[in-house]
Amino acid sequence: MDDIGFNLIEKEDYLHFMIKKTYDFDTFMSDLEKIKELSRKKRCNKIIIDLLESDSGKWNIELSDRFNIGLKIVNLFGFPDFTRIALICDKKYYENLVEDVTSKRGVYYKVFFDIKDAV
Protein backbone atom coordinates (compact mmCIF):
# COMPACT_ATOMS: atom_id res chain seq x y z
CA MET A 1 0.00 0.00 0.00
CA ASP A 2 2.79 2.43 -0.84
CA ASP A 3 0.59 4.72 -2.95
CA ILE A 4 -1.70 5.62 -0.05
CA GLY A 5 -1.15 7.66 3.08
CA PHE A 6 -2.15 5.02 5.58
CA ASN A 7 -1.64 1.47 6.80
CA LEU A 8 -4.61 -0.83 7.23
CA ILE A 9 -4.84 -3.11 10.24
CA GLU A 10 -7.75 -5.53 9.98
CA LYS A 11 -9.34 -6.32 13.34
CA GLU A 12 -12.07 -8.82 14.09
CA ASP A 13 -14.95 -6.36 13.90
CA TYR A 14 -13.46 -3.11 12.57
CA LEU A 15 -10.83 -1.69 10.23
CA HIS A 16 -8.06 0.41 11.77
CA PHE A 17 -6.48 2.92 9.38
CA MET A 18 -3.17 4.25 10.74
CA ILE A 19 -2.25 7.52 9.07
CA LYS A 20 1.46 7.80 8.27
CA LYS A 21 3.67 10.62 9.59
CA THR A 22 4.20 12.11 6.12
CA TYR A 23 0.60 13.11 5.57
CA ASP A 24 -1.26 16.22 4.53
CA PHE A 25 -4.77 17.53 4.14
CA ASP A 26 -5.13 16.85 0.39
CA THR A 27 -3.96 13.26 0.82
CA PHE A 28 -6.45 12.79 3.65
CA MET A 29 -9.32 13.97 1.45
CA SER A 30 -8.39 11.62 -1.39
CA ASP A 31 -7.68 8.72 0.95
CA LEU A 32 -11.19 8.97 2.42
CA GLU A 33 -12.39 7.51 -0.89
CA LYS A 34 -9.82 4.71 -0.65
CA ILE A 35 -10.88 4.02 2.93
CA LYS A 36 -14.49 3.79 1.74
CA GLU A 37 -13.52 1.41 -1.07
CA LEU A 38 -11.54 -0.85 1.27
CA SER A 39 -14.28 -0.91 3.89
CA ARG A 40 -16.84 -1.86 1.25
CA LYS A 41 -14.52 -4.54 -0.16
CA LYS A 42 -13.94 -5.95 3.35
CA ARG A 43 -17.67 -5.66 4.14
CA CYS A 44 -16.99 -3.74 7.32
CA ASN A 45 -18.94 -0.70 8.46
CA LYS A 46 -16.86 0.09 11.55
CA ILE A 47 -13.77 2.21 10.93
CA ILE A 48 -11.11 3.79 13.09
CA ILE A 49 -9.00 6.52 11.50
CA ASP A 50 -5.94 7.01 13.67
CA LEU A 51 -4.06 10.31 13.39
CA LEU A 52 -1.95 9.91 16.54
CA GLU A 53 1.23 9.03 14.62
CA SER A 54 0.73 11.61 11.88
CA ASP A 55 1.83 15.21 11.70
CA SER A 56 -1.78 16.31 11.27
CA GLY A 57 -1.30 19.15 13.73
CA LYS A 58 0.74 20.95 11.06
CA TRP A 59 -2.06 20.90 8.49
CA ASN A 60 -3.53 24.27 9.53
CA ILE A 61 -6.93 23.31 8.14
CA GLU A 62 -9.18 26.28 7.46
CA LEU A 63 -12.71 26.33 8.88
CA SER A 64 -14.25 25.85 5.42
CA ASP A 65 -11.98 22.85 4.80
CA ARG A 66 -13.12 21.27 8.07
CA PHE A 67 -16.70 21.75 6.94
CA ASN A 68 -15.83 20.11 3.60
CA ILE A 69 -14.24 17.14 5.39
CA GLY A 70 -17.54 16.65 7.20
CA LEU A 71 -19.53 16.81 3.96
CA LYS A 72 -17.18 14.34 2.26
CA ILE A 73 -17.57 11.89 5.16
CA VAL A 74 -21.37 12.25 4.93
CA ASN A 75 -21.35 11.67 1.16
CA LEU A 76 -19.07 8.63 1.40
CA PHE A 77 -20.25 6.94 4.57
CA GLY A 78 -23.84 8.06 5.13
CA PHE A 79 -27.04 6.49 3.82
CA PRO A 80 -27.34 3.68 2.80
CA ASP A 81 -24.12 2.40 4.40
CA PHE A 82 -24.40 3.90 7.90
CA THR A 83 -20.73 3.40 8.61
CA ARG A 84 -19.56 4.06 12.17
CA ILE A 85 -16.36 6.12 12.18
CA ALA A 86 -14.08 6.88 15.10
CA LEU A 87 -11.28 9.36 14.56
CA ILE A 88 -8.38 9.36 17.00
CA CYS A 89 -6.32 12.53 17.31
CA ASP A 90 -4.23 14.45 19.78
CA LYS A 91 -6.50 16.44 22.10
CA LYS A 92 -4.69 19.70 21.34
CA TYR A 93 -5.81 19.47 17.68
CA TYR A 94 -9.44 18.64 18.45
CA GLU A 95 -12.10 20.82 16.93
CA ASN A 96 -15.73 19.65 16.81
CA LEU A 97 -16.92 21.11 13.49
CA VAL A 98 -16.55 17.84 11.56
CA GLU A 99 -18.45 16.01 14.31
CA ASP A 100 -21.23 18.61 14.17
CA VAL A 101 -21.50 18.46 10.37
CA THR A 102 -21.62 14.67 10.24
CA SER A 103 -23.93 14.08 13.20
CA LYS A 104 -26.48 16.61 11.94
CA ARG A 105 -26.57 14.71 8.66
CA GLY A 106 -27.08 11.24 10.10
CA VAL A 107 -23.53 9.86 10.13
CA TYR A 108 -22.07 8.28 13.23
CA TYR A 109 -18.67 10.01 13.54
CA LYS A 110 -17.00 10.58 16.87
CA VAL A 111 -13.58 11.91 17.87
CA PHE A 112 -11.54 10.15 20.56
CA PHE A 113 -8.13 10.77 22.06
CA ASP A 114 -6.96 7.19 22.54
CA ILE A 115 -7.48 3.82 20.93
CA LYS A 116 -9.13 2.17 23.92
CA ASP A 117 -12.01 4.65 23.98
CA ALA A 118 -12.39 4.52 20.20
CA VAL A 119 -12.70 0.74 20.14
Image (cartoon, grey):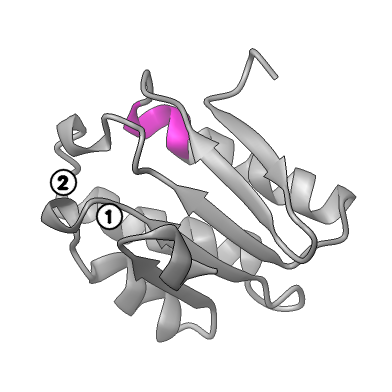
- Which residue corresponds to mark 2? 62
The kind of secondary structure element at disc 2 is loop
Q: Main secondary structure of the magenta part?
A: helix
Asked if the stretch drawn in magenta spans residue 79, the answer is no
| Residue 1 percent location from the top left of the image | 70, 20
Above or below: residue 27 compared with residue 102? above
Q: Which residues are magenta?
A: 24-28
SS for tag 1? Answer: helix
Residue type (three-letter) at the residue carrying disc 1: Arg
Q: Residue at x 39, y 54 (%)?
A: 69
The reply, left or right, for residue 6 in relation to residue 114 is right
Q: Are marks 1 and 2 in contact (CB under 8 Å)?
A: yes
Which quadrant holds residue 87?
A: bottom left
Q: CA distance from mark 1 to mark 2?
A: 6 Å
Expressed as whole percent of the image width and height from the top left, the position of residue 61 reads 19, 42
Residue at 52 percent across and 60 percent down: it is 73
Q: Amino acid at mark 2?
A: Glu
Label 1 crowd bin: few (<14), some (14–19), many (20+), radius 10 Å: some
The residue at 63%/73% (across/down) is 78
> In this rendering, is residue 60 above or below 65?
above
Dot 2, how many residues are within 10 Å of its Cα: few (below 14), some (14-19), or many (20+)? few
Magenta residue check for 27: yes
Q: Nearer the viewer, residue 78 or 92?
A: 92
The correct choice, above or below, for 113 with respect to 56 in the image is below
In the depicted view, which residue is nearer to us: 86 or 96?
86
Judging by the rendered image, the residue that carries numbered circle 1 is: 66
